[in-house]
Image (spheres, rainbow, N blue to C red):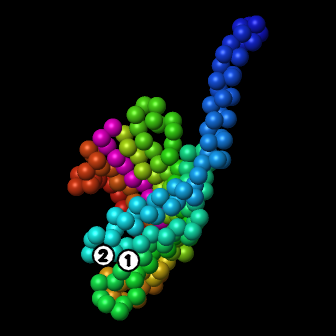
């Protein structure tokens, strides 16, 4: 038994060691600053032609585990429709997104995310299995008074904390056919 294990250890061990090192060092040397600049530039260029001008700003971007990204200081500024009025601002203190690699082996897609924003946390996942999509989001202690677009739409000051879960399943990837549970 020991001879058989030693015989195949090199055949299996060396490629496995190579793949682990490749993934580890690729994530450590990835140019996250260039990726940040590319995301910001492409978003800002796409949002200019429309009537509601938006500007994305990201302070810092880096790796998160092997297949993820962590961003800090994310701001989305939206120009006001009324001249002379300050733009609305959505601020996210920290966001991390991780793409799972193992579901890709069977043709599925799975992404997990965590946000520290509006004085609370938002965490969840987005899954694609064939044509079906699902989203699972958990909100904890979100200060709704800090959600500027919501305050501007309602036109009144808001106060309080929001928490709960949202679970949606979208057959054929269509939101119009979505079913699920919303508990806030």
Above or below, 140 against 32 in this view is below
Which residue does the image show at 64% across and 47% down from the upper left? 29
Separation (CA) of disc 2 from disc 1: 7 Å
- Residue 159 lies, in percent from the top left, at 45, 84
In the image, 146: left or right of 178?
Answer: right
Q: Residue at x 65, y 26 (%)?
A: 16
Q: Earlier in the sequence, mark 2 or mark 1?
A: 2
Task: Determine which quarter of the picture holds residue 87.
Answer: bottom left
Residue 53 place in picture, x, y as percent: 34, 75
CA neighbours of label 2 inside 10 A, class few (<14), some (14 to 19), many (20+): few
Q: Furthest-bottom residue in view?
A: 84
* Residue receiving disc 2: 52
User: Residue 162: percent from the left, percent from the top?
Assistant: 46, 73
Q: Are marks 2 and 1 in contact (CB under 8 Å)?
A: yes
178 w.r.t. 50: above or below: above
Magenta span: chief secondary structure: strand
> Could you say which is closer to the camera, residue 170 or residue 93?
93
Q: Position of residue 77 (x, y in %)?
A: 42, 76
In this rendering, position of residue 178 left or right of residue 76: left
Q: Residue at x 42, y 54 (%)?
A: 136
Q: Is residue 100 above or below residue 96?
A: above
Total numbered badges shown on the rendered structure: 2
Q: Is residue 138 magenta?
A: yes
Residue behind mark 1: 78
Taking 47 as reference, is 126 above or below it?
A: above
Which quarter shows the C terminus?
bottom left
| Magenta stretch: includes residue 24 | no
Highlighted range, magenta:
130-139
Classify mark 2: helix, strand or loop: loop
Which one is nearer the viewer's eye here, 54 or 172? 54
Tell which residue pokes out farthest to the left in this image.
Answer: 176
């Amino acid at each position: 038994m020991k001879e058989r294990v030693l015989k195949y250890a090199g055949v299996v061990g060396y490629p496995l060691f190579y793949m682990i090192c490749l993934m580890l060092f690729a994530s450590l040397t990835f140019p996250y600053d260039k990726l940040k600049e590319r995301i910001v530039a492409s978003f800002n260029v796409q949002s200019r032609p429309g009537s509601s001008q938006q500007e994305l700003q990201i302070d810092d971007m880096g790796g998160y585990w092997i297949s993820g990204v962590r961003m800090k200081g994310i701001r989305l500024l939206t120009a006001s429709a009324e001249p002379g009025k300050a733009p609305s601002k959505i601020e996210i203190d920290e966001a991390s997104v991780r793409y799972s690699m193992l579901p890709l082996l069977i043709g599925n897609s799975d992404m997990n995310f965590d946000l520290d924003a509006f004085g609370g946390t938002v965490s969840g996942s987005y899954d694609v299995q064939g044509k079906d999509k699902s989203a699972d989001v958990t909100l904890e202690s979100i200060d709704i008074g800090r959600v500027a677009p919501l305050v501007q739409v309602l036109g009144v000051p808001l106060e309080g904390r929001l928490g709960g879960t949202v679970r949606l399943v979208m057959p054929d990837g269509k939101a119009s056919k979505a079913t699920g549970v919303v508990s806030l």
